Amino acid sequence: MLVLLLLPVLAAPAADRELLELLEQIDATCEWDPLREAGVILAGSDRIAFQVGTPFVLINYTERLDIPAPRRENGRIVFDAGAVEAVTAAVTRMRTERPEAGLRIAAIVLDPGHGGKDPGGVGSRTVDGKPLALQEKDVVLQLALGVAERLRSVLPGKDVVLTRSDDTFIELEARAATANALQEKLGDAVLYVSIHANASARSKANGFEVWYLPPTYRRTLIGSQDAEGDPDLLPILNSMLEEEISVESVVLAREILQAIDAQVGTVSPNRGLKEEAWAVVRNSRMPAVLVEVGYVTNPAEAAHLADPAYLMDLAEGLYNGIVAFVARFERAGSSGDR
Ligand SMILES: [Zn+2]
């Protein structure tokens, strides 16, 4: 089935007939960043990154395949017949030779924000007619522990790591570093989900939202030590890898937002997807999102966020979103954990 995903920032491409046929043939979807003129074809768990004017694609960000460079004509992306043929052959070969391979998520890092000396946002709710403080650090820790427990029972083959599992203060840089080190060690992809609660001077503000890194944010993903041969390749490789991470982050953010909405959307407003280079996620070299589960400064929402049953619903939503993303990411390798 051919599906072109519409994302708020990554528009579906106005694709040429050859590209559309290619997508259909390999049962794939495509995400396209018009600003960078780069895109990713998502074929099950395989990813094919391309860029207009670049005479090769990257398959799963490791294998380079030379093709006639995709072009842009009248706003459309054009893959020549030769390019379509080469990509189709490569995907077919990969699926035959190693049907269970493709990309795999090895670990999920849950990052409950703040902790220790840093309470995060502080609000209050009324208990027996008296105001009782509610601290963000406590809400998000309870939540993260709940999500971790669910993930561990359903995805036993994956590492589920918490940046903190008690009331400890951890520097921002150390949080992303934990995730990056894990990814380096495991070799496969790691998801990074930072969990926060919001605060506002406006006590009426309420609702949940999910943030991801804007695709235009620049990171150095591949260092020069990894560059083999042509040094001119490095910026292109980085650009393609960035594209991949941006695309996956948006998809992860969308899955989590929808899943939380399904759990608590009747009680708390959905504030939507947002993009920002948050300090806490900007140093992670992997799909990363930041979830704001609600406002501790809204008295009614604070009452919910202090309620274990409501936190359980939120944890369920976060968990469902992550699992949906993992299933999607690993779809072609549906044999599960290896
Ligand atoms: Zn926070």
Image (cartoon, rainbow, N blue to C red):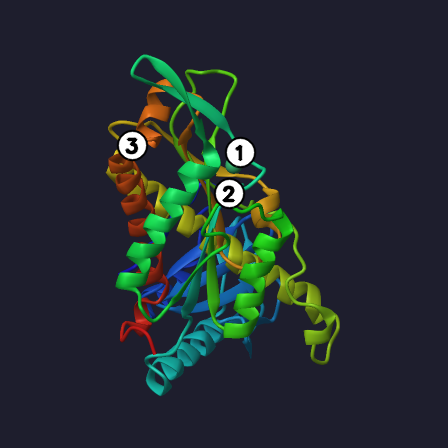
Separation of disc 2 and disc 3 at Cα?
19 Å
Q: Residue at x 45, y 67 (%)?
A: 47
At label 3, which amino acid type do we have?
Answer: Asp
Give above or below for 68 relative to 298: below
Q: Is mark 2 within 8 Å of ligand 1?
A: yes
Q: Is mark 1 within 8 Å of ligand 1?
A: yes
In terms of secondary structure, where does tag 3 sit?
Answer: loop
Q: Residue at x 49, y 69 (%)?
A: 80
Pointer 1 residue: 120
Q: Residue at x 60, y 59 (%)?
A: 177
Separation of disc 1 and disc 3 at Cα?
19 Å
Nearer-the-camera pick, 158 or 321: 158
Give above or below for 169 relative to 130: below
Residue 337, by quadrant, is bottom left
At label 2, which amino acid type do we have?
Answer: Gly
At label 1, which amino acid type do we have?
Answer: Gly
Image marks 2 and 3: residues in contact by CB distance under 8 Å: no
Give above or below for 293 relative to 11: above
Residue 51 visible somewhere in the drawing: no
In terms of secondary structure, where does tag 1 sit?
Answer: loop
Q: Is residue 99 left or right of residue 210?
A: left
Which residue is outermost to the top?
129
Image marks 1 and 2: residues in contact by CB distance under 8 Å: yes
Q: Residue at x 72, y 74 (%)?
A: 225
The image's mark for residue 307 is 3
Pointer 2 residue: 113
Mark 1: give few (<14), some (14-19) or many (20+) Cα within 10 Å.
many
